[in-house]
Image (tube, rainbow, N blue to C red):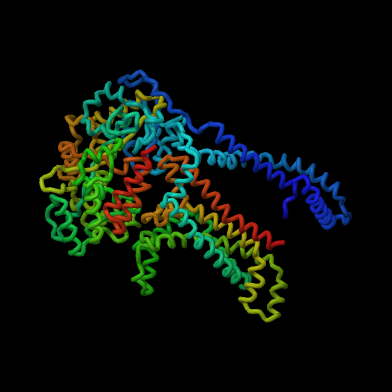
Amino acid sequence: MTTARPRVENTIGHDLARRATRTDRHGTAVRPARRRRLAGRGGLIGWILVAPALLFYAAFVLWPLIQGVQFSFYDWNGIGASTWVGFTNYLTVFTDPDLLGAIKNAFILIAYFTFIPVIFGLILASLIRSMKAGFFSSFSQTVLFLPQIIPLAAAGIAWSWMYAQMGAVNQILGWVGLGDLARPWLGDYQTALPAVGLIGSWTLTGLCTVLLLTGIGKIDQSLYEAVRLDGAGWWREFFTITVRGLRQELAVLITITIIAALSSFDIIYTTTLGGPGRATLVPGISIYRIGFTQSEVGLASAFGIILMVLVLIVVLPIQRLSKVRDQ
Amino acid sequence: MSPTPRGRRLRGAATATLMASITALIFTGCAPGSAPQSATTATDVSTQLTKDKVQLTIADETGFPLTDDLAKEFTKQHPNITFKITRDTFQNLTANAPKLLASSTPPDLIRLPTLGDTVKDGLVADLDPFAKAYGWDKWPAAQLAPLRMTKDGERGSGSLYQLGLGYSVTGIFMNKKLAAQAGITTTPETLDELGDDFAKAKAAGVAPLVEGDKDGVVNFTVQAAMNQYADKQEFLDWMFNKSGASYNTPGNVKGAELIRTWADKGYFPSDINAVDYFTFVSRFQDGGGVFTFNGNWEAANYAKKLGKDVTFFLVPPAKKGGDHVAMGAANSFSAAAKSKHLNEVAYFLNWVHTNDKARQIVVDVTGAAPGGDPSQAQPKVEKGSITEEVLKAAAQIAKEDGQVDFMANTTAGIYAGAIIPESQLLVTSKISGQEFVDKVQAFYEQEVKK
């Protein structure tokens, strides 16, 4: 470490000097040493400014997280005495087929929570962009964003009515002559998971569209003109300019929606409760039941920690990817 | 933005601190939780109601207004006692109950469907001293057995920790008008006859059974079938968590297999797993089918819409003339061990079981039997009403000593963790009766072994 440090310091120092020179508004180059002193003082003030938030973060995020890790090594009902059980709880999560099934379902939900909304969001955003700004364009933006402001629990209840045997979905199928397809969508083993997944698609598409629209707004219009002058069509324009220009937004959206899929709870809780059988059981529901109904706080904590690690494993590479491409 | 070495160092330090504190916490042996509090400090038991002003707090579930009406009447008779009743959904209340009871301001009285670990953790008050003082020990033993628990967590014996505000009984409701359409003129006397009736209804194009299993309520039907084949004591031992007791008995398997047969024959609604309790109750009210398995608590509700067209009978035995077995349970309430008003709570509980007006309220509001001493005058009910039929059924079960607890109350987690998902698979012919029993037993063993 000690041998490597000066080298790193040097390159970074050089980099800092370069940047300082580039960014100084008064046009005078700031010397690296002074710059570092300033940063040091700013650091202290920064810490003071950050302290209140940090305190809350520590008390309400870090401390519970540490406690969760601690609990996961115990057999504890949340109230009475606890017994140290080592890694038994973790082993249970990885060996219980029902709990593994819940994890598998969560990964399947990524298709509905991430792929569908992001792809639809991209298409819708570029369609809206190509519309003339006016009543219709802002109207469609508003309509598309509406599902986002409805609480997921309410969306779940409303959709479970629509999916019912006599619900809107089956009625519409009947009108268009597809009455044979009618079924209790949430009570059928084959369709329950896709059905709840599509509720997620419905709520998240609005968010994706609006975020991607603002992203498109930032793309230099001249790029579009250039590619059009070269005779590119809509698809070419879409892939060459729009998708590439939206890398950052896409990374953010993919991250948010994957987390929503893996930690989903409210939609399932209000529609199927994990049924039929365990067809729509997800980790969120399992953890809630194990922790609060069965009062096995240790096992619930272990499952929670595993879920957190899984989310990080999936999401961190996406972060990396967007940063690497950025440079 | 590539991190500066300073940032990297800081981040490293933060991670190290986090890891260090976690490791320290885990290995310093400061285990979470605390040893159970010593047994309830004996309050001086008094059967005289205080003259002081006292406010009792009750935590109850939403949708059951009984406590409101009882509290109102009690305050009318004893103006110095007032009530503060908080309500939460059944699921939330059961999930939060241990934490509420352990808090520094626990409710004096709480709706508690399963005792779980609350006795072991010293959270609920031992009502034995009051039972002695008030003479509750002279009530039918079967009525109070499910409300007792030993220190080892076995129910059925030990100290009394709960009392019921009304005692339920389950059976079958029949829509007489639709039954007549299907050519069913009398209520069935055996399980086979019941099966024949289902076949008749189906042949006549009427839905035989109105059921829903999104929230697992078909377990009323599953257990009703099991009850008729199983050894009652063996089944109860399992529900009371006696050591060595098993769910995997020939009787239980036979009952579950019967349900599978009914599923194969298409007696259950095709959307059963998408239908929740409230939906199937209203479907039956709207004439959605001939039979439904449910409890006395819906009697008044059904009669409101179906009038004289609805009747209630106990689930018929397997053999003609056999004794009836039916699920029934107290609408159970426990007093918090930390309550400062145990004497007043006990007085209130005793009053609910013995005061004529209170007993009348229990029957009027819930249709459930008021419990208590059977020799005491029974509340008045309308002649020929469904409430009368239900109370008669409850009396018959008491006479035949045929009451068993709900298997969903066996452990805190068994309903959501095993009975709901497995029954959904059973009623849609995805698993056999034996598989159903095996899976529930496996879950039970994993939950009880602690």
Is the N terminus of chain B in the top left, top right, bottom left or bottom right quadrant?
bottom right
Q: Position of residue B423 (x, y in %)?
A: 31, 52
Q: Is residue B282 visible?
A: no
Q: Position of residue B63 (x, y in %)?
A: 35, 44
The front one of B160 and B283 is: B160
Q: Is residue B339 left or right of residue B192?
A: right
Is the C terminus of chain B in the top left, top right, bottom left or bottom right quadrant?
top left
Residue at image point 51% right, 54% down: A262
Residue A291 sits in quarter: top left
Q: Position of residue B312 (x, y in %)?
A: 19, 48
The residue at the far top in this view is B44
Q: Is residue A85 left or right of residue B446?
A: right
Number of residue marks: 0
The front one of B2 and B101 is: B2
The residue at the far left in this view is B321
The residue at the far front in this view is A3
The front one of B131 and A239 is: A239
Q: Is residue B390 visible?
A: yes
Q: Position of residue B341 (x, y in %)?
A: 38, 24
The residue at the far bottom in this view is A231
Residue A20 sits in quarter: bottom right
The front one of B434 and B182 is: B434
